[in-house]
Structure formats: structure tokens, C-alpha cells
Amino acid sequence: MEPAAQHAVVIWPLILFLVAALGLVSLMLGLSYMLGGRHDERLGNQPYESGIKPTGDARMKFSAKFYLVAIIFVLFDLEVVFIFSWAIAAPELGWTGYEALLTFLFDLALGLAYAWRIGALDWSPRAPRQFRLAAIESNKRRNLPSENAENDVPMGS
């Protein structure tokens, strides 16, 4: 048997699977289109939540912190995937794999510490500007450095 013929024997199950998968998807979409109901009602495009009538606009703005938390969640979720895959391959990897995992966890901890330091995980509301300025002036009178000594603004500015 020629090498090309051997590859053809190995590839045909994959082609059969792809054709079957595409056929099944097409069948389900077609049946859904033919058998599904069509509603051109006024309320058809409004948001629906547990039978409660909607109040307000569904397109309100979200704080950027929601997206930041979502990104951090995805990063830590991927971390779990990497740790599980490392745990499965740990016996074959030996100490080199263990050192690589520790380096990965250390880098991740540095990223978490940075996010914590810049306040990405802080959801408490910030004090109004006038109270922060008053605290800066109070610290200056007592000769204490403020949190942002280089950005201190005098009270009258």
C-alpha cells in the first residue's frame, strides 16, 4: 500500500465526523426555523426577568470595575486549568516541572499583588475630594507624609 493511500484510510473517519456534525447542526437549525413560532409583538424585543415587568432601560452603563473583575476571574480560571494539567503530567515532569509551576504561581501572585496595590480589587467608594484635601492639609500641619506626597494639592487650589 502506498503512503498516500495509508493517509486516506486514516483521514476518512475525520471527514465523516465533520460531515455528520455539519449535517446535524444544519438539521437542528432548519427544524428550529420551520417549527419555531414567530412573534412580531411589541413586547417581543424587551428584556424578560422571571415574570417581572421591566423598569428602566436595559442598556445602562456598568462600571469598568465589573470588566476588570471579569478579566481577573478568567485569568485565575485559566490558572486552575494549567495547575490541573500540571498535576496530571507531574510524575513525568519531575523537578523541572515543579520549578516551572512555582515560577508560574509566583508570577501570578505578583500580578495579584499589583492589582491589589493599584486598587483594582477595592470596591469601597472613595472619599470625596474635599475630605482627601482636608486630610492632606491635616497631615502637613502635623508633618506627616500623605499617601500621594508628590501629588499634594493645597486646600485653596
Image (tube, rainbow, N blue to C red):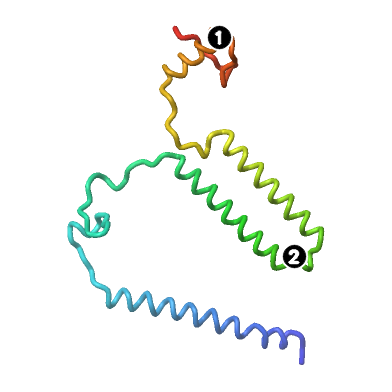
The image shows residue 112 at horizontal and vertical percentages of 61, 43
In the picture, the disc for residue 22 is: none
In which quarter of the view is residue 15 placed? Answer: bottom right
The residue sitting at the left extreme is: 42
Compare residues 66 and 135 and report the one nearer the observer: 135
Q: Residue at x 69, y 64 (%)?
A: 87
- Indicate the amino acid at tag 1: Arg
Q: Single out the residue that lies furthest toward the front.
A: 142
Residue at the right extreme of this rendering: 95
Q: Earlier in the sequence, mark 1 or mark 2?
A: 2
Q: Is residue 11 above or below residue 81?
A: below
Q: Which residue does the numbered mark 2 point to in the structure image?
A: 90
Q: Position of residue 30 (x, y in %)?
A: 35, 77
Q: Which residue is tagged 1? A: 142
When asked about the image quadrant of residue 16, the answer is bottom right
Q: Nearer the viewer, residue 64 or 30?
A: 64
Marks 1 and 2, Cα distance to the nearest angstrom?
A: 57 Å
Left or right, residue 90 beside residue 65:
right
Q: Is residue 111 above or below residue 152?
A: below
Classify 106 as above or below 37: above
Q: Which image quadrant: the C terminus?
A: top left
Dot 1 falls on a residue whose secondary structure is: loop
Q: Where's residue 18, x and y in %?
A: 54, 79
Percent of width and height locating residue 106: 70, 46
Assess whether mark 2 and mark 1 are in contact (beta carbons under 8 angstroms): no
Q: Quadrant of the N terminus?
A: bottom right
**Residue at point 26% right, 45% down?**
57
Residue 141, above or below 104: above
Whether residue 42 sits left or right of residue 114 in the image: it is left
Residue at figure coordinates x 51%, y 81% from the top left: 19
Q: Secondary structure at mark 2?
A: helix
